[in-house]
Image (cartoon, grey):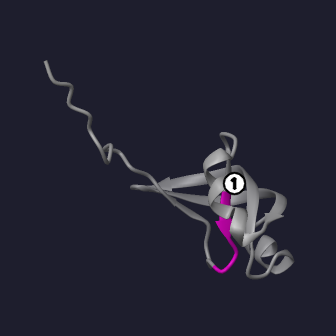
């Protein structure tokens, strides 16, 4: 299913989706095919985002495109003392 179809089925909601196909453009993953799993209440979105299985993501349908920004460098590096 295309992201636009998900937006029409679940307007203005967080949705747990399974990513079926995507293309990479630089530091972005442009999701082209998804399988919606279920809508997520706003108060549960943060928890659902961090507990999503690999290959799934929580995303809000207010976004015109489903884009995942890839981070190549870690945000935090741990330096161990002696």
Q: Quadrant of the C terminus?
A: top left
Looking at the image, residue 35 sits to the left or right of residue 14; the answer is right
Circle count:
1
Which quadrant would residue 37 be assigned to in this image?
Answer: bottom right
Looking at the image, residue 74 sits to the left or right of residue 36; the answer is left
Pinpoint residue 65: horizontal percent, then vertical percent: 61, 73
Residue shown at the point (65%, 39%) measured from the top left: 54
Residue linked to disc 1: 48
Residue shown at the point (33%, 43%) measured from the top left: 74
Q: Quadrant of the N terminus?
A: bottom right
Residue shown at the point (73%, 81%) measured from the top left: 12
Label 1 environment density (alpha carbons within 10 Å; few <14, some 14–19, many ≥20): some
Magenta-tinted stretch: 58-62
Q: Give yes or no for residue 61 being in the magenta stretch.
A: yes
Q: Give yes or no for residue 75 being in the magenta stretch.
A: no
Which quadrant would residue 35 be assigned to in this image?
Answer: bottom right
Residue nearer the viewer, 45 or 67 = 45
Looking at the image, residue 54 sits to the left or right of residue 13; the answer is left
Residue nearer the viewer, 25 or 45 = 45
* Residue at the farthest top position: 82
Dot 1 falls on a residue whose secondary structure is helix
Q: Chief secondary structure of the magenta span? A: strand
């Amino acid at each position: 299913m295309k992201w636009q179809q998900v937006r029409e089925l679940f307007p203005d909601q967080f949705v747990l989706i399974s990513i079926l196909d995507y293309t990479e453009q630089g530091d972005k993953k442009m999701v082209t095919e998804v399988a919606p799993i279920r809508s997520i209440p706003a108060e549960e979105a943060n928890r659902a985002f961090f507990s999503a299985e690999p290959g799934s993501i929580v995303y809000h349908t207010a976004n015109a495109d489903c884009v995942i920004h890839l981070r190549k460098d870690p945000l935090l590096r741990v330096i161990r003392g002696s």
